[in-house]
Amino acid sequence: MVIGKRGRTHFYIKHYYITFKHTYPSDIMTNKAKKDIAMRHAMTDPSFLHATLFHSALNLCRLRGTTFSRDVYYHHGESIRIINRRLSDPKFWKVSDVTLLTVACLLHFEILADFAFNGVRAGLETHEAKIHFDGLQAMVNGRGGLEKISKEFPSGKSATTFIAWTDTCVSIALNIRPRFELVQSERETGDDDWTPYSTLARRYQSKLYNLTGQKELSEETIHVYSALKNITPLSEREALNMIGDGDATAVFQYKGQLERLERRSLALVLSASESPNQSLLIYQLFGNAAMIHALLFMRESPASIPLARLLSERIRKTLDAVDLQSYLLQYPEMVLWTLIMGGLGAMGTQTQQNFATILAQSCLALGLVGVSEIAFMVEDFLWCDMYCSPTTMAFWNAVAIEQASGTQRTVVDRTQKPI
């Protein structure tokens, strides 16, 4: 394949090998060797090459902290142009795995670019992503669905895994239900049975049911909560070491559990949003917080930070619609944990300061001062050591400053007892 000079193609190929594959966060199952394979595939297909260079150019802008360059739009447009020309040609009666990967790659990074890759909108319109989502769904259906694709060719499994993850990302970004069912191997499946639940979990299940009247939503909330509590985060480095030692079973099991957890958390939010009942907003708050935890502390992906910021903003808007005083009395540990997730998810944005203020005031009203006391309060509910790390200290410093400022605005009347 002849490689032209437009769009600084050679420069972005060099960036891919020198910087991109070593610094850009990847999925737990997508190591550097697989990125080499991806580039070799790209060198045989011009549409996939331009999609990969679009990906690489986005990464460079992210590292530099700049707005998106003309090269980003050039490679994005060229990939789409080639795909459209290919699909209009009758001889391409069957969509290839590479074409599916190309469209999924474009869709994936259109969504991430448009939802604050560098804290600002990129100008890649969301309606374009929706059009490509429709096209991807039509192509997958034309091939007989993801499950059939995963079994047809060796590259089919990789294609279906990435398409399913893209489906999850787009669904979170647009706050809609996923279009495809997860296709998981036998090693990735499981019953996710976390019973018997802890005493705290049973108490919250009963409390949620009594206060909202929603049996199914309360049960699903505690299932998601128990998954968060029982699934130990597995870093990419640990996973790759386990695979290298021949112990891949636990890695695949973790991958399957994480994919199902993300989908169930999103489903919880969407199910709760179908009713105008204000008491159900607690399910939306918890579901969005659960997705932030999964994205930031259970999955290493370029999607994590942009989507976590988006989810934090949704939590903030939901908080504006609830009586925080009542919620703190009814669900103290859950609400404090949700505020923590909202703050950690909003890293690098003004929204983080908003969460720091709300959390500081809420904790002061409950008699909690300092990170250690906050941690003790939510430890039985859910606490992870990664909540306090060099990347999260800006949030905790902001909380400390707010608490030290002497702002004692009453959030909770302490003369009342928690329900």
Image (cartoon, rainbow, N blue to C red):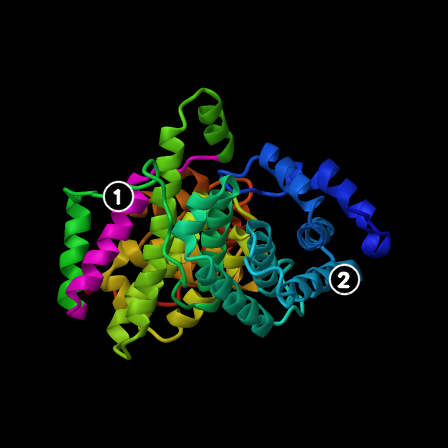
Question: Helix or strand or loop: what does disc 2 sit on?
Answer: helix
Question: Helix or strand or loop: what does disc 1 sit on?
Answer: loop
Position above or below: 240 against 224: above
Q: Is residue 285 magenta?
A: no
Q: Label 2 belongs to which residue?
A: 74
Q: Residue at x 38, y 69 (%)?
A: 319
Q: Is residue 221 magenta?
A: yes
The one of 169 and 416 positioned closer to us in this rendering = 169
Q: Residue at x 77, y 60 (%)?
A: 69
In the displayed structure image, the side of residue 69 where residue 310 appears, left or right: left
Position above or below: 70 against 239: below
In the displayed structure image, the side of residue 69 where residue 225 appears, left or right: left
In the displayed structure image, the side of residue 47 where residue 357 appears, left or right: left
Q: Looking at the magenta stretch, what is its main secondary structure? A: helix
Type of amino acid under label 1: Asp
Type of amino acid under label 2: Tyr
Q: Residue at x 80, y 50 (%)?
A: 9
Counting labels gives 2
Horizontal and vertical percent for residue 92?
61, 59
Q: From this viewpoint, which residue is outermost toward the right?
A: 5
Rounded to the nearest whole Å, what is the CA distance between mark 1 and mark 2?
Answer: 51 Å
Horizontal and vertical percent for residue 334?
29, 56
Horizontal and vertical percent for residue 344?
48, 52
The one of 234 and 256 positioned closer to us in this rendering = 256
Magenta range:
212-235
Q: Quadrant of residue 172?
A: bottom left
Q: Residue at x 28, y 40 (%)?
A: 230
In the displayed structure image, the side of residue 166 where residue 225 appears, left or right: left
Question: Which one is earlier in the sequence, the residue at label 1 or at label 2?
Answer: 2
Which quadrant of the figure contains the C terminus?
bottom left
Q: Callout 2: few (<14), some (14-19), or many (20+) C-alpha neighbours within 10 Å?
A: some
Q: Label 1 belongs to which residue?
A: 380
